[in-house]
Image (cartoon, grey):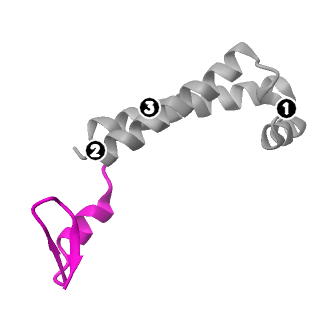
Amino acid sequence: MLDADMFVGSVAIVFGALVASAAIFNWEWYYQLKKVRWIESLSGRTLARVFFMLLGFGLIVLGGVIAIGLLSNESVGAVRHSRHNRVSEDGFAYRF
């Protein structure tokens, strides 16, 4: 597991919790945001709340999966195994 995976997973969990909380508690300030107002205008407040609740829970699950290492950053492996790149002892890839 990489530190980057843990960071990305944690950020997804925090944002997912924020979005889900805004939907559950019907925070008015959240529904005044421009993009959220647009989604609310398409479907109404109730369906917008359901959408954001599902989105929030999805972000929480995705963040958990990334943080425990089930989904990892594939580009790191590609950089490490390229024939033109070398990985130093500290884990950084350098092109030679």
The disc, 3 or 1, on the residue closer to the chain's N-terminal end is: 1
46 vs 75, left or right, is right
Residue type at mark 2 is Asp
Residue for point 25% across, 47% down: 2
Mark whose residue sits in front, 3 or 2: 2
Q: Amino acid at mark 1?
A: Gln
Instruction: Classify residue 6 by image quadrant.
Output: top left
Tag shown at residue 32 = 1
77 drawn magenta: yes
Residue 9 in which image quadrant? top left
Say whether disc 1 or disc 2 marks the residue closer to the N-terminus. 2
Residue at the (85%, 42%) spot, across then down: 38
- What is the secondary structure assignment of the residue under circle 3? helix
Disc 3/disc 1 C-alpha distance (Å): 26 Å
User: Residue at left 80%, top 25%?
Assistant: 29
Asked if the stretch drawn in magenta spans residue 5, the answer is: no
* Disc marking residue 61: 3
